[in-house]
């Protein structure tokens, strides 16, 4: 049984300029999740979260609220294939 998963999350709302990426990276590192959090040109933040299923799920729950200065209006989550190209760390590209 494979307990690892990857999810691509698109977070909408007031999520840029409020330390969303840095806070997400801190949460991900605390949980042992790898991937990235990047600003998109349309104002959303894309989060790739890969790791133990329970840790990825916990990070996705955290993304529904984000850091105190953020306002999350919508969160889209898509499971993606977990393969040997698993990220080794978490970046805020």
Image (cartoon, rainbow, N blue to C red):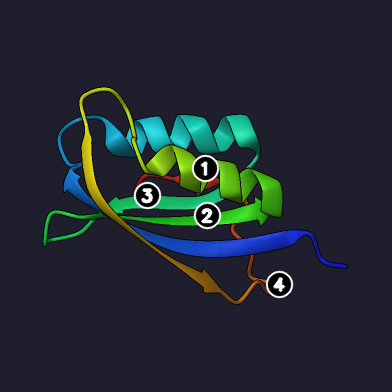
**Given contact means CB atoms under 8 Å apart, are the residues at marks 1 and 2 in contact?**
yes
- Separation (CA) of disc 3 from disc 1: 12 Å
Q: Which residue is mark 3?
A: 37
**On screen, residue 77 above or below 65:** below
- Separation (CA) of disc 1 from disc 2: 8 Å
Relative depth, front residue between 93 and 1: 1
| Residue 26 on image: x %, y % | 47, 29
As helix, strand or loop, the secondary structure at mark 1 comes to helix
Badge 1: residue crowd in 10 Å (few <14, some 14–19, many ≥20): many
Q: Which residue is mark 4?
A: 84
Q: Which residue is mark 2?
A: 49
Q: Earlier in the sequence, mark 4 or mark 1?
A: 1
Q: Which residue is mark 1?
A: 59
Badge 3: residue crowd in 10 Å (few <14, some 14–19, many ≥20): many
**Given contact means CB atoms under 8 Å apart, are the residues at marks 4 and 2 in contact?**
no
As helix, strand or loop, the secondary structure at mark 3 comes to strand
Residue sticking out furthest to the left: 42
**Given contact means CB atoms under 8 Å apart, are the residues at marks 2 and 3 in contact?**
no
Relative depth, front residue between 35 and 53: 53
Q: Earlier in the sequence, mark 2 or mark 3?
A: 3
At 34% from the left edge and 36% from the top edge, which residue is drawn? 65
At 39% from the left edge and 43% from the top edge, which residue is drawn? 63
| Residue 12 on image: x %, y % | 21, 53
**Given contact means CB atoms under 8 Å apart, are the residues at marks 4 and 1 in contact?**
no
As helix, strand or loop, the secondary structure at mark 2 comes to strand
| Residue 82 on image: x %, y % | 65, 71
As helix, strand or loop, the secondary structure at mark 4 comes to loop
Relative depth, front residue between 9 and 88: 9
The answer to whether 80 appears left or right of 8 in the picture is right
């Amino acid at each position: 049984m494979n307990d690892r998963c990857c999810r691509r999350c698109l977070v909408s709302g007031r999520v840029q300029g409020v330390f969303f990426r840095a806070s997400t990276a801190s949460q991900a590192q605390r949980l042992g999740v790898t991937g990235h959090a990047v600003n998109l040109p349309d104002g959303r933040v894309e989060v790739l979260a890969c790791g133990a299923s329970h840790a990825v799920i916990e990070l996705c729950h955290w993304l529904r609220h984000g850091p105190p200065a953020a306002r999350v209006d919508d969160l889209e989550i898509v499971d993606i294939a977990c393969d040997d190209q698993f990220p080794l760390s978490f970046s805020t590209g």
